[in-house]
Image (cartoon, coloured by chain):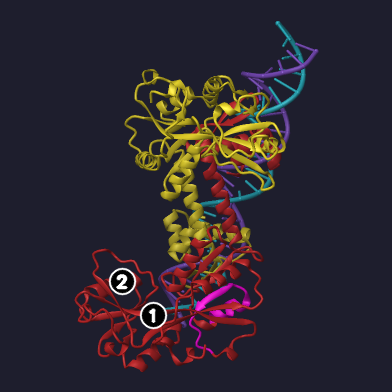
Chain colours: A yellow, B red, C cyan, D purple
DNA sequence: ACGGAGACACAAGCGTCGGTTGTGGCTCGC
DNA sequence: GCGAGCCACAACCGACGCTTGTGTCTCCGT
């Protein structure tokens, strides 16, 4: 590819060969091989050099794009000046959506969204502290004094919870519900591991409103959960208002907001003090500007109330 | 890259090796080489297989994007089902802009914009006829009966001409001019070759309004022309209203519309009858929907008046 | 507690691919 | 008409990458 571009730019094999520090014959071979593998002629050979054919011209921008992609790929792991790396709990959560909006508002921004494998708050904070990631969206149930030195936490996104039920569920027709109204109903949130980040939140939620949340069963992923909810008359689950789930159009699922009080999931933004990455500054500015209003009757766990 | 993705998807070298029809050892070597060339570890090796590191996870989407780019590049020259290939006179002309708008309105559309090397109408029509390109934007000075069988031509874009002058030019202060008012002024349009497409248009324009158009001198490109215009007190040139020139902010150039009559450049859309390419249909629909109103006092050469 | 299964890494052998050197054919311009 | 400039073909050679063979580690079942 590089050779193709060098030849296209130079207009002749000879000069491209000099640029690439190889012989003209090597350039000739490379181009011939590329043409053979593509099955088309990319250059018309003339006495003064070469000129792109129509196929070559159509190929040219794609070729440049390919090299740019290669450059971005390498840059994403280059120590020192790599793209801003932000960790999210999962790619359907409200913070992931916020990052997506940020990216659309700033096209071309060097941003990588990752998901920490062993997702717990301490590991995420440690990764930020060590510089492996630049920031993380988490619900941080720690008092500020327990944070490592130089770690800053801002509550940037309170995401109201919705109840998600199938059409056959007794609560399906409600337009809004109080958390207390969920008492006695089965709420299924698979994949909660003991000590995991969500568990701490849901533990306190169940206690405050006398709910019953099942964490049992393996987590087969979002799609399987939605399938089960849609087909069941008594299963329900909780999702964030900002979550972006996709389900088949055949599923008649209902989102029911909770109010009185409004339980919100307190997403915080964890970062290292003094990180000079310009995209980090831009992202923080974006988050501050687009931060949704906190509901007046918001409910958060006790450990989040001071922040 | 493919190997990296296969491993990331499989979660282990062994299975990826089977998928790729190579040995596990080869996979191990490929990944090790990739990691060495990037300077980072992409996988953490475990007893049950491998898992992506943070670097690996950041690298993953870029890797996929790279392969997609490679796929698009190959598809752009694949005979049979390639991307829609449209030829434009140059990349700053109004049709190029229209194509860009079309692309932005339909992101991800498979569209390749090319520029025929020996740009003349006959060659372009022949290329469309032969299927080398799917369509071409041209000013076609031919009666319909002289077109090859199966070639269709639609006038889709009348682009009004503007006079472009530097701040020191005597006409710089005008807000509009008649074509006749340009008589006696030097108009410089380098790079017009005898028999070329524009030449036919400008020949008739000069004759109709008694103008003097200099085609002399080599064409050093748009930037050099604009440099010269900006610095000169008597040079002027003609550009399309839809043209997208870029010039340094230091250049004080003035665009002056021409009216009474309004000379327009009649861009036509040349295509082959029966071409089933879906993007061609979409593009024609887009062109029809965004077609600008023709000025009431439009002037076109005699050969374009019947269309 | 121990042994086997499964997974990745290291080492040696070997073929292929890609580079260089050498040469020929072609076109353009002096 | 001849030389300069450019690209293609051929022969040679080293290096890279794949395979086969083996080692080591971890997990799990007996």
Q: Which residue is mark 2?
A: B224
Residue under the image location 54 percent in, 30 percent down: A178
Question: How packed is label 1: few (under 14 Cα within 10 Å), some, or many (20 or more)?
Answer: many
The residues bearing labels 1 and 2 have C-alpha atoms spaced at a distance of: 23 Å
Magenta-span inclusion, residue B27: no
Check if mark 1 and mark 2 are on a common chain: yes
**Residue at the spot x=56%, y=82% of the render?**
B153
In the image, the segment drawn in magenta is B123-142
Is A137 located above or below residue B206 in the figure? above
Instruction: Give the side of residue B137 with respect to residue B251, left or right.
Output: right
Snapshot quadrant of residue B178: bottom left
Q: Is residue B247 visible?
A: yes
Q: Nearer the viewer, mark 1 or mark 2?
A: 1
Counting from the top left corner in percent of width and height, residue A286 is at: 38, 43
- As displayed, is residue A105 above or below residue D20? below
| Label 1 sits on residue | B160
Secondary structure category for the residue under label 2: helix
Q: Secondary structure at mark 1?
A: strand
């Amino acid at each position: 590819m590089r050779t193709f571009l060098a030849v296209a730019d130079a207009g002749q094999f000879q000069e491209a060969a000099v640029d690439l520090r190889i012989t003209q014959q090597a350039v000739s071979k490379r181009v011939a091989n590329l043409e053979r593998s593509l099955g088309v002629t990319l250059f018309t050979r003339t006495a003064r050099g070469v000129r792109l054919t129509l196929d070559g011209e159509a190929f040219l921008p794609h070729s440049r794009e390919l090299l740019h992609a290669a450059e971005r790929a390498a840059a994403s792991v280059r120590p020192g000046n790599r793209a801003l790396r932000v960790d999210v709990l999962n790619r359907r959560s409200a913070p992931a959506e916020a990052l997506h909006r940020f990216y659309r508002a700033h096209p071309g921004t060097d941003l990588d969204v990752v998901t920490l494998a062993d997702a717990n708050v301490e590991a995420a904070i440690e990764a930020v502290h060590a510089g492996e990631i630049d920031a993380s969206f988490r619900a941080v149930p720690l008092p500020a004094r327990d944070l490592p030195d130089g770690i800053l936490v801002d509550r940037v996104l309170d995401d109201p919870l919705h109840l998600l039920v199938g059409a056959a569920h007794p609560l399906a027709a409600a337009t809004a519900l109080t958390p207390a109204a969920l008492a006695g109903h089965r709420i299924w949130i698979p994949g909660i591991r003991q000590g995991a980040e969500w568990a701490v939140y849901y533990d306190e939620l169940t206690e405050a409103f006398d709910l019953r949340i099942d964490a049992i069963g393996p987590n087969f992923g979002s799609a399987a959960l939605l399938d089960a909810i849609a087909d069941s008359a008594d299963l329900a689950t909780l999702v964030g208002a900002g979550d972006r789930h996709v389900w088949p159009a055949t599923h008649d699922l209902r989102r029911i907001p909770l109010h009185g009080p409004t339980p919100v999931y307190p997403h915080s933004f964890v970062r290292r003090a003094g990180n000079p990455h310009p995209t980090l500054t831009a992202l923080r500015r974006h988050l501050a500007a687009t931060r949704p209003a906190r509901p007046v009757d918001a409910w958060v766990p006790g450990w989040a109330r001071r922040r």
